[in-house]
Amino acid sequence: MRSDVRIDLGALRRNARTLLRALDGAELWAVVKADAYGHGAADCAAAALDAGAAAVCVATVDEALALRARVPAARLVVLGPAADEEIAAARAARLELVVSGGAIPEDVPVHLKLDTGMGRWGTSELPSPARKVVGVMTHLATADSDPAFARAQLQRFREATDHLAHLLRHAANSAAALRLPESRLDAARCGIALYGLSPFGTDPAEDGLEPVLAWHSELALCKRLRPGDSTGYGRRFVARDETWVGIVPVGYADGFRRDLTGTHVLVEGERRRVVGTVSMDSFAVELDRERPAGTAVTIVGGGLLLEEHARAAGTITYELASRIETSPERARRVVVET
């Protein structure tokens, strides 16, 4: 197998309990959209619920329907819009829907969404709640980067929903749950922190979180480059001196992005630099000496954080994690409990 993606549900459970302590009485709603940000929605939803989460959130009705058999008794909330033709299936599966405008569907529990500054889904003014409305919500745009704007959003939300205190009110995401106590309200919808990834792009241990995902491969071969030799498309790495490079059978089709040249991986625990152009099915790593084929390579884990790769690529961990390919044809997905 070209690589192993290891998912530690024990770490996820501990992260859930860390978030519950931070929430100080508010409910934790586990966000497992996009296959739990690449971690496996069914396994992660079940583990989060077992650790104390009160609900599971997804993006689409189809995601919720796929989960229902695994978590038959769970509160399942669909955060994205539902098409008219999906309402019957949502009703039959006991889903809760978020409504951002238009007609409120009948006989389905509904959360009304107020746009307080995200400028995306949500109404500018809340309609009068109908009988099946069970909650009101908003989405914070800058809880990870601009607390002042997040607090302004919260103020608007509270003012708009003070008369709806009998309904569930929820606004906090992971960043707000960890750093903005006033955002916690009745429930917090936490995704990235549940997986032990920092919503602030820093070391998750600063907030008591443990990475859930580790990614391992090995050297497929080792090559000696003479001065002037190169590796990879475009000759982006040309050896100045005699240099050993290892070829790792993981590339951008596996989720190791093309712009990760220059990041580091661990070769038998030693940090080594990724060189040359990352190709579809492999990348090259600069070595200090010849290494045998089969030498262990850690892409994520062992103290090497996904946050570091995100900084190298100029992106966020959400994107990197959700794009790691775990189909049986490309990688082996291993679920463990520690």
Image (spheres, rainbow, N blue to C red):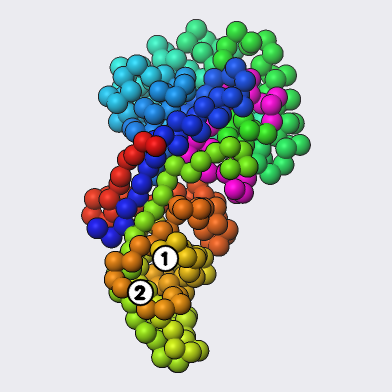
Mark 2 falls on what kind of element? loop
* Residue drawn where x is 32% and y is 40% of the image: 335
Q: Amino acid at mark 1?
A: Val
Q: Is 250 one of the magenta-colored residues?
A: no
Q: Nearer the viewer, residue 23 or 102?
A: 23
254 on left or right of 235: left
Q: Mark 1 near mark 2, Cβ–Cβ under 8 Å?
A: yes
Q: Which residue is mark 2?
A: 291
132 versus 266 height, above or below: above
Q: Which residue is mark 1?
A: 267
Rendered-image quadrant of the N terminus:
bottom left
Rendered-image quadrant of the C terminus:
top left
| Res 76 quadrant in image | top left
For the magenta stretch, what is the residue range? 180-204
* Residue drawn where x is 40% and y is 23% of the image: 50
Q: Amino acid at mark 2?
A: Arg
* Residue drawn where x is 57% and y is 11% of the image: 167
Give the percent coordinates (x, y) of residue 67.
32, 29
Give the percent coordinates (x, y) of residue 233.
39, 79
134 on left or right of 332: right
Q: Nearer the viewer, residue 301 or 106?
A: 301
